[in-house]
Image (cartoon, rainbow, N blue to C red):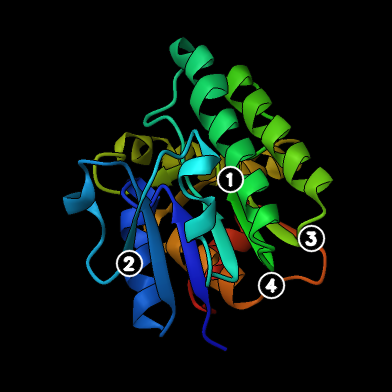
Amino acid sequence: MDHTVFIAGATGYLGRHVTPRLLERGHAVRALVRAGSESNAPPGAAVVIGDPLDRSTFEKAIAPADTFLQLVGVPRPSPAKAKQFIDIDLRSARESIAAARTARIAHFVYVSVAQPAPVMQAYQAARHRAEQAVDASGLPHTIIRPWYVLGPGHRWPYLLLPAYWLLERLPMTRASALRLGLVTLSEMGAAIVRAVERPPARQRIVEVPEIRMARGNA
C-alpha cells in the first residue's frame, strides 16, 4: 500500500535522507518548509510552507497525508542546548501532534532518542515528554529510538566501535550497550520506511537492535 507522508523536518539530516527513499518506494511526500527555504526541500516532495512551531500555519495542508513523520530537532544536540530542546524539539512535537489529531492522521511516526542513558539528560527529558504527548493523543503511533546516527558530518563516534564491540559481548553491559548502540543513516532510513509501511494497530517502539535489523527488511 502506498502512503502519503507529511514530514516535519524534511530538510534536516534525517529528512533529506529518508524522503528520496520514500519516493523511490512509491510513496508521496509533503514536506513542511519554512518560508524562504523552499529550495532546500528534497526533490520530488510537495512543498508546504509553514512554521513547525505553529500548527496553525500547516495543519490545513496536511491532507491528503495518512502518515505524519516528526523529525524536527536541534542539530548536533549537546548539554549546552538544554533550553532549545524545550523550545524547539518539544514544542514542535506538541504542535505536530495537535495538528495530526486535527487532520485525523492514521499513523504518527516520532523519532525520539534511546532511553535511559547516563548522559544528555535534558535531551532525553524533552524527548520523553514528547513521547508521552504522542501516547496521550490517542493516535496510532510508532516511536523510533536511535542513540547516535552515523553519517556525513557525524562520523567521530566510529572511533568508539571497538569499545562497543566489547561492551556488547560482556553480560553486565550488553543490554545497555545494545540500547545505546550506534546506527547508520542507512539503517535509520530503512527503519523509518519500514515504520511507514507497517503501521501498528495502536503503538510500537523501535529500539536500536530493531533499527539495525531494518536495513535488510524495508
Label 1 to label 2: alpha-carbon separation: 18 Å
**Given this view, does label 1 or label 3 mark the residue nearer the observer?**
1
Measured as percent of width and height from the top left, residue 115 is found at 69, 35
Q: Are marks 1 and 3 in contact (CB under 8 Å)?
A: no
Label 4 to label 3: alpha-carbon separation: 8 Å
User: Tag 1's secondary structure?
Assistant: helix
**Taking 61 as reference, is 213 left or right?**
right
Q: Amino acid at mark 4?
A: Pro
The disc, 4 or 2, on the residue closer to the chain's N-terminal end is: 2
Residue annotated with mark 2: 46
Q: Is residue 155 visible?
A: yes
User: Tag 2's secondary structure?
Assistant: strand
Measured as percent of width and height from the top left, residue 92 is found at 54, 35
**Given this view, does label 1 or label 4 mark the residue nearer the observer?**
1
Label 1 to label 4: alpha-carbon separation: 18 Å
Q: Amino acid at mark 3?
A: Gln
Q: Amino acid at mark 1?
A: Ser
Q: Amino acid at mark 2?
A: Ala
Residue annotated with mark 4: 199
Q: Label 1 neighbourhood size at 10 Å, few (<14), some (14-19), many (20+)?
A: many
Measured as percent of width and height from the top left, residue 20 is found at 31, 70
Residue at the (40%, 64%) spot, across then down = 30
When the figure is inspected, residue 129 is found, relative to residue 189, above or below; the finding is: above
The disc, 1 or 3, on the residue closer to the chain's N-terminal end is: 1
**Quarter of the N terminus within the rendering:** bottom right
Residue at the (40%, 69%) spot, across then down = 29
The disc, 3 or 2, on the residue closer to the chain's N-terminal end is: 2
User: Tag 4's secondary structure?
Assistant: loop
Residue annotated with mark 1: 96
Residue annotated with mark 3: 203
Residue at the (48%, 19%) spot, across then down = 84
